Image (cartoon, rainbow, N blue to C red):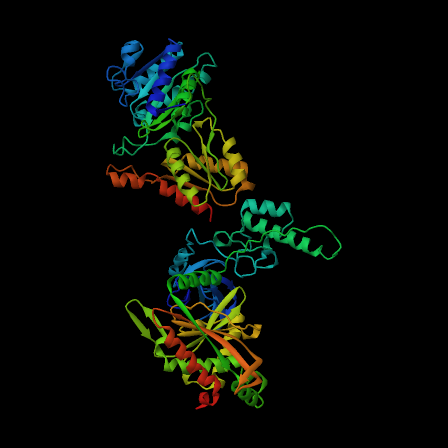
Amino acid sequence: MAKITMREAISQALMEEMDRDPAVFIMGEEVGVWGGTYAVTKGFYDKYGADRVKDTPIAENAIVGAAIGAAMVGQRPIAELMTINFAFSAMDYIVNQAPKLHYMFGGQFTVPMVIRAVGGGGRQLGATHSQTPDAIFAHFPGLKVVSPGTPEDAKGLLKSAIRSNDPILFIEHATMYQVRGEVPEGEYLIPIGKSKIQRAGKDLTIVTYCKGLELSMKAADELSKEGIEAEIVDLRTLRPLDMEPVLESFKKTNRAIVVEEGWKSYGVGSEIVSCIYEEAFDYIDAPIVRVAQKEVPLPYNRALEQAALPQVSDIIAAAKEVLR
Amino acid sequence: MAETINMPKLGFDMAEGTLVRWVKQVGENINKGDVLAEIETDKATVEVESPASGVVLQLIVNQGDVVPVNAPIAVVGVAGEKVDAASQKSSKVESQRSADEKPLPAKPEPAPVSQTVSAPSDGAIKASPLAKRIARDNNVNLSQLQGTGPGGRVTRKDVESALTSSQTSKVSSLQSPISSPVVISHDDEVVQLTKLRQAIARRMTESKTSVPHFYVSHEYNMGAVMAMRKQVNEYLPDDQKLSVNDFIIKAVALALREFPNLNATFAGDKVVRHGAVNVGIAVAVTGGLLTVVNKNTDQLPLRQISADVKQKVFRARDGKVKPDDIEGSTFSISNLGMYDVENFIAIVNPPEAAILAVGSAREVPVVESGELKVGWRMKATVSVDHRVSDGAEAAQFMQSLAKYLETPALMLV
C-alpha cells in the first residue's frame, strides 16, 4: 500500500468521484484558481474548469444555500467551508434546512450534499478560527457528521459521503493534512456510520476520533512501554454513532477514557459516556474519564493554546487514573 | 468548640498514612487519650489518640484512604454541635493517591474473603457495577471484601481474587487421600505488598546497593552469660526473667561506647558519630520485621533494658507500636538464635553503620587447655559500612564484645 498524506487522500477522493460522476462539483472560497486554502483542490480548476470548480464570494450562507438548491435538483455539490468556524454564518442552512428537507417534503426531495469544513486548533489562528464545534452539528438528526483520523479513512469515507443521498458534514483537521498513512491501491469505499478498532489492547478502551486518534495512538505507545495496552476505538462518524465496537471493547476492558479536541461540557465524550452507562452499566469497573479542551476560548499565544488543547500527557494521565 | 484532628506526623520522613480503621464512629463519646483510629505508616500500624474529649462529630476520610500528614481526618466536639465550615471545607484534602501507588489492603493477610471490614459510614458498599455483578453471579458477599480501588472501592480484581482464593481452599481440603493419583495443581498466589513490606523492600535495596558491606564473624564463649542468667533468673518473677539477648544488647551497647565509629552514620564527606547509644532490635512481625529501639542502652541496667524491649516487642507483634518505639536506633541487632541458627549475615539498616547478626548459643565440644570439654558457644557476624569503618576496627569491636560476654560481671559495674 502507498503511504500518502491526508491532503492527497482527500484530493484523490474528490478527483475520483468527479471523474466518475459529472453531477459532482465543488464550490467554495478560493477552491478554484487558488487551489484551496489548504491546497486540497490544487489543479482541479485546470482539469475540470470553472463550471465544476466554482469560486464563490465570501458568503457561507450563499455557498451552503446554493449547494442545497443544486442538490435538490439532482446535482452532487461539495461545498467547502474554509474553516468550520464560518459554518456559524450558514447555521440555518446547515442544521435547519439541509437535514430536514427530505422529512418536511415527505420524501420528495433528497439533499445529496457534502460540506467539507476544516476544524480544530493548534495553528495559532485565534479564538474565533480554532474551534472544534463538532458536537453541535452532531446534535441534529438528519445531518450526518463524519470526521476521519487517518488518510485511508478520509479517502474511503469522503467517497461514500459524495455518493450518499443525505447531507453530510465532513470535518477535516487543520493540523492533519500532512499526516501520512497507508492507503489501499485502487478504488475503495468505507461505509459511513461504522466505528473502527484502530489499535487492539486489553487494559482500557480509548474512544476517540480525528485529531484525538493521532494523540491517542502516541499515548498508547507510551503506555505500552509501561505494560498498559490500550484499545483504541475510532468513531470516524459522530452521527450516526456506531457504539457497537465501543461497547464490545468496553465489555472486555471495563475501563475507558474518551478523548476529543472540543470542549468537555456537552461534548462527544459526554455522549459516549452516557451510552456506556446506558448500555453497559454492569461492566463498569471504574469511573470513565473525559479528556477534552479546557473550557476557555482557545488562546492565540502558542504556549497557552497548547495548554488549553488536550495533549498526549493528558491522555496518559487519564488512562492511569481509570486504571487505579 | 469542635476540634479538628489531623493526620499525625510520626517520624521525620512520614509524608502520608493510610487510615486503616476507625475505632470510634460518628456519634460515639470519646475521652481525651482514647484511641480514635488506627493508621498504617511506612513502618507500622499505630493508634491515633484523641486530643480532646467529646463526641465524634465527623469522620472526614474513609477507611483505606491514604491521607497526607496534617490533613484533617476527624472532628470531635459537643453533641449536636454544628461542624464549622472550615473543617468541612478541608474534607476536600481527601486522599490523592499517586498513580503508581496501588492502594493496599488494611492488613497484610493475603486472603481478602476472610476479612470483615465494617461498611463505610453511609451504609452502602462501595463497589463498581462490574464487581457487583460478578459478586451477584457467584454468590460472593461484597461486604466481606476489602476494596483496593480508590477510596476502598471494590473492583473486579478484588472479587476475582476472592473467588480464586476460595477455590484454592476448596482444592486443598480435598487433598487428604494419599492414594489418589490425581496431581493437584496449586494456582499462583499474588500477594499485594503491605506498606511495611514496601518499606523493607525499598530500604534493603537501598542499603545493599549503596552501602559497601563487609563482614566479620566471631565465636563467643557464652558459658559465663548462661551461668549468670540462670543464677539471676532464679530470683526474678516469670515475667521479668532475662533472656540471652538482653545480655547481648547490653554488651553491644558497652562495646559501642568504646567504638563510636560503629555507632555512626555515613554522611557524604563526614561521619556522624552518635552521642547516644540506642540499640535497635529486629523483631519479626506479620508480613515483615520492625526494629524496636532501646534508648541509651549503655547506661541502663539489664533489667530495665529487658523490660523496655519486652514491652516494645509485644507492641510491635501486636501491630500497635508507638512512633517512639521504632525511631532513633544507632546500631541494630538481629538475633535468630531461637530458630537454631548457627550463623548468618544481616544487611545494614540505614542510616546506621553496622548491624550484628546473632546465631544460637549452643552446647558444643570445645578444646580448652588441651582437653576436650562441653562448652556454650555462640557465633555472631557484624556487617559494617566500609565507608565508615574497616575490618580491623570491626574485629576489635567483636573482641570487645567478647570481653563483656565472657566476663559478664563487667555489665553490672
Q: In this view, does A19 lie to the left or right of B138?
A: left
Q: Residue at x 41, y 74 (%)?
A: B331
Q: Which of the 4 image quarters holds residue A161?
A: top left
User: Residue B81's spot in the image, x, y percent?
Assistant: 45, 65
Q: Which of the 4 image quarters holds residue A185?
A: top left
Farthest residue, direction front: B370
Q: In this view, does B192 lie to the left or right of B273?
A: right
Q: Which of A194 and B275 is in front in this view?
A: B275
User: Residue A310's spot in the image, x, y percent?
Assistant: 35, 39
The quadrant the N terminus of chain B occupies is bottom left
User: Residue A276's spot in the image, x, y percent?
Assistant: 50, 37
Instruction: Count up the numbered dots.
Output: 0
Residue B82 in view here: no
Q: Residue at x 38, y 65 (%)?
A: B211
Q: Considering only vertical position in the picture, is A132 above or below B331?
A: above
Q: Considering only vertical position in the picture, is A93 above or below B292?
A: above
User: Residue A277's spot in the image, x, y percent?
Assistant: 51, 39
The quadrant the C terminus of chain B occupies is bottom left
Q: Considering only vertical position in the picture, is B366 above or below A168?
A: below
Q: Is residue A242 left or right of residue A3?
A: right
Q: Considering only vertical position in the picture, is A2 above or below B209?
A: above
Residue B244 in view here: yes
Q: Which of the 4 image quarters holds residue A32?
A: top left
